[in-house]
Amino acid sequence: MFVAIVLSRIHAFQRYRASVRELSHFSDRELDDLGISRYEIDTAA
């Protein structure tokens, strides 16, 4: 059970990092179209 929880959190963190990485490649205009600014990427991910 403990291992499943740890693996679940690892996968969630990997998805989070992938989202941050993808959003970081967007231009400021693309981010504005999504309604977020560059400094909000961590929160939005």
Image (cartoon, rainbow, N blue to C red):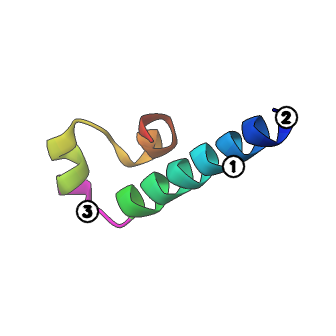
Residue with the most extreme left position: 33
Q: CA distance from mark 3 to mark 1?
A: 28 Å
| Mark with earlier residue (3, 1) | 1
Q: Residue placed at 25% from the left, 62% from the top? A: 27
Q: Nearer the viewer, mark 2 or mark 3?
A: 2
Residue designated by label 3: 27
Position of residue 39 measured from the top left corner of the image (x, y, whole percent): 46, 44
Rendered-image quadrant of the C terminus = top left
Label disc, if present, on residue 40 of the rendered structure: none
Position of residue 4 measured from the top left corner of the image (x, y, whole percent): 74, 40
Label disc, if present, on residue 10 of the rendered structure: 1
Position of residue 40 measured from the top left corner of the image (x, y, whole percent): 43, 39
**Mark 2 touching mark 1, by CB under 8 A?**
no
Q: Is residue 24 magenta?
A: no
* Most frequent secondary structure within the magenta stretch: loop
Stretch in magenta: 25-29
Secondary structure of the residue carrying tag 2 is helix
Position of residue 9 measured from the top left corner of the image (x, y, whole percent): 68, 40
Q: Is residue 13 left or right of residue 23?
A: right
Amino acid type shown at disc 2 = Phe
19 w.r.t. 37: above or below: below
